[in-house]
Image: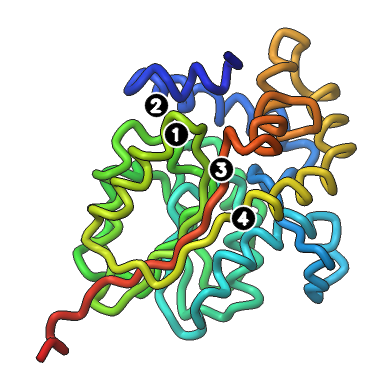
Amino acid sequence: MSLLEHLFAIGRIRKTLWAWWYPFLTRRLRSDDILFLNYAFETDPPVGLALDPEDEPNRACIQLYHHVASAIDLSGKEVLEVSCGHGGGASWITRTKHPQSYTGLDLNPEGVRFCQKRHAVTGLTFVQGDAQKLPFADQSMDAVINVEASHCYPDFPTFLNEVARVLRPGGHFLYADFRFGDGFDVWQKAVNSAPLEIVNQRDISSEVLRGMDANAASSLALVQKRLPKLLHDLGRDFAGVPGSRVYEALRSGELSYRSWCFRKPDHSQDG
């Protein structure tokens, strides 16, 4: 069992460990201007997404955000991203999808400070906060986005309830993440029990695997450059490089990466 799998297996303790890992990672990576901490996405044939030159180095990671965020039209909407990482996805969506406002929230205070300094985009703000206790009023958001983060949360159903709470009726939750095989049923049960309607869902494991391949060389170089040797195995898993436990589990089907678009019911329109 890999260290990443141990982090999945130890329940609430994992929140403490992730709370250590992400600030540590930010401190290690900020001099390299790493804007994305998620895996990636590539279709066959390739997506062909038009990007500005400054975004091109992050193409594969941006394409995952594009896949998630393009499920609905975000223009003019008030959008919250929970667990925004280093803010690359938040910046790209704000610049290209034109929401009225976009708030990136993350538990990692080092990451939030990095985002606040790095991403000067009109309408985009960053705040520190807990995904399981969102610091926003009821029915205050038109859309909530969550990309590759909920596997870190000790109580996923509570997070889904918080998403539903802050969404306005008719609002959308745009979501993507992964689980190992022994967690599939619990994951799906929580999704099915959420106070949200499933608009669509999709297994994107093959596209994420291609994205990992596209990023493999740069990801491995970064692990070797910035992490102490003791943490190389965890770093390779976290980066999803070929040969790592996560990469091989995704390739074999032991790990599944999925995306959803949910809608909060608008009961005022019933009948």
Sort mark 1 into few (<14), some (14-19) or many (20+) by Cα contacts within 10 Å: some
Residue 229 location, x and y as percent? 78, 10
Separation (CA) of disc 4 from disc 1: 20 Å
Q: Which disc number belongs to residue 152?
A: 1
Q: Quadrant of the N terminus?
A: top right
Sequence-wise first label, 4 or 1:
1
Q: Which amino acid does label 2 sit on?
A: Lys
Sequence-wise first label, 3 or 1:
1
Q: Name the residue under label 2.
A: 15
Quadrant for residue 240, please give it: top right
Q: Looking at the image, which is closer to me, 257 or 156?
A: 257
Q: Name the residue under label 4.
A: 204
Q: Which disc number belongs to residue 256?
A: 3
Residue at the image point whose x is 67% and y is 35% from the top: 252
Is residue 270 rendered to the left or right of residue 168?
left
Separation (CA) of disc 2 from disc 1: 6 Å
Q: What is the residue that sits farthest to the front in this orientation?
A: 252
Is residue 175 rendered to the left or right of residue 50?
left
Q: What residue type is labelled 4?
A: Ile
Separation (CA) of disc 4 from disc 3: 8 Å
Is residue 18 rendered to the left or right of residue 253?
left
Q: Which amino acid does label 1 sit on?
A: Cys
Mark 3 or mark 2, whichever is nearer to me: 3
* Total tally of numbered discs in the picture: 4
